Image (cartoon, helix red, strand yellow):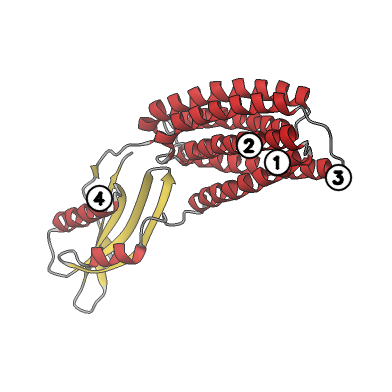
């Protein structure tokens, strides 16, 4: 088999560098709001003796760290790739998202433990103060969620921060309900029960985040791309006889890569035309711009005897 280098074309899509400004600004605003509410809920939880507020304050403490970690991940991912790291630091964002998910699991376990202790030995709670602090926390969390909402669909890392904020909002709603039960019915156990319910919601959302991050780290195909459909569409391109070694994976949030071998007939000479058709399919139908496509010619006996590697990518 003989081979020779083919033409190289680079198409620039929106990379993590292009998303740092918008997402980073949203994360900074959310960080300031969350840190402020953390201090308020911590003080309010201590004075009201509310587990729901203290649990939410503890959750917000991890949020402050998670938001700071997210900002650091965006900055780190935008750094130029050093020698030996050909993809740069794209995966730092995914590692940060995974760590965020793990933090959420740990804090939910802590809430479960504390809720159990409170159910075994109920303690008096100052419902009025708890209601005031929880209401302020809910308002702040909703503002943070609104700020992050526009960017969370583009970045798994921001999505992790968004889930943190939503979990905080759920914690605040739970604290409000518990405070009302304490004020009107003198039911102090409501504080622990609501905390446990919120912990279940936090655990379920964090598990989904962890699964998404692990799937990317294991280079699984993105959920929105059907590999069978993609291969069928490639086979439908003019002069394409077969497609093999098809791989699709996510580099980082919003950056999908693909590689494959495309076999053409012995008499096919316009490799660039075949590449253009294949590239158009993956770009228009699947929004994949970072591709490596190897063109192989098939001889009379079906053997492949010539190949050409061509790359299209953002880097």
Q: Which residue is mark 4?
A: 283
Q: Residue at x 60, y 50 (%)?
A: 204
Classed neighbour count for the residue bearing mark 3: other residues with Cα under 10 Å, few (<14), some (14–19), many (≥20): few
Q: Earlier in the sequence, mark 3 or mark 4?
A: 3
Q: CA distance from mark 3 to mark 4?
A: 59 Å
Percent x, y for residue 294?
28, 58
Q: Residue at x 48, y 40 (%)?
A: 159
**Disc 2 + disc 1, Cβ < 8 Å:** yes
Nearer the observer: mark 4 or 1; the answer is: 1
Q: Which residue is mark 3?
A: 120
Residue that sits furthest to the right in the current view: 121
Dot 1: element: helix
Residue that sits furthest to the front in the current view: 184
Residue 241: which quarter of the image?
A: bottom left
Q: Is residue 110 visible?
A: no
Q: Residue at x 87, y 41 (%)?
A: 121
Residue 50: which quarter of the image?
A: top right
Q: CA distance from mark 1 to mark 3?
A: 14 Å
Q: Which residue is mark 1?
A: 195
Classed neighbour count for the residue bearing mark 1: other residues with Cα under 10 Å, few (<14), some (14–19), many (≥20): many
Q: Which mark is residue 171?
A: 2
Classed neighbour count for the residue bearing mark 2: other residues with Cα under 10 Å, few (<14), some (14–19), many (≥20): many
């Amino acid at each position: 088999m003989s081979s020779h280098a083919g033409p190289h074309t680079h198409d620039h899509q929106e990379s993590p560098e292009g998303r740092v400004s918008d997402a980073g600004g949203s994360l900074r605003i959310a960080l300031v709001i969350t840190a402020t509410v953390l201090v308020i809920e911590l003080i309010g939880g201590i004075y009201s003796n509310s587990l729901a507020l203290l649990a939410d304050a503890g959750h917000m403490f991890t949020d402050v760290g998670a938001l700071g970690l997210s900002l650091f991940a965006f900055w780190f991912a935008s750094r130029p790739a050093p020698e030996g790291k050909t993809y740069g630091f794209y995966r730092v964002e995914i590692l940060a998202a995974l760590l965020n998910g793990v933090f959420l699991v740990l804090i939910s376990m802590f809430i479960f433990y504390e809720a159990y202790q409170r159910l075994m030995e109920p303690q008096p709670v100052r419902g009025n103060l708890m209601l005031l602090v929880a209401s302020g926390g809910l308002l702040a969390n909703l503002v943070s969620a609104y700020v992050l909402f526009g960017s969370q669909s583009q970045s798994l890392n921001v999505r992790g921060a968004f889930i943190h904020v939503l979990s905080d909002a759920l914690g605040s709603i739970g604290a409000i309900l518990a405070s009302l039960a304490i004020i009107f019915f003198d039911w102090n156990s409501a504080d622990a029960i609501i905390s446990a319910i919120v912990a279940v919601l936090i655990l379920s959302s964090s598990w989904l985040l962890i699964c998404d991050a692990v799937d990317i780290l294991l280079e699984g195909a993105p959920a929105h791309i059907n590999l069978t459909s993609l291969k069928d569409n490639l086979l439908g391109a003019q002069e394409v006889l077969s497609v093999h070694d098809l791989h699709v994976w996510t580099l980082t949030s919003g950056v999908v890569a693909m590689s494959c071998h495309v076999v053409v007939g012995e008499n096919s000479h316009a490799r660039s035309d075949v590449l253009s058709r294949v590239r158009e399919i993956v770009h228009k139908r699947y929004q994949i711009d970072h591709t490596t496509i190897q063109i192989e010619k098939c001889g009379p006996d079906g053997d492949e005897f010539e190949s050409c590697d061509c790359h299209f990518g953002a880097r």
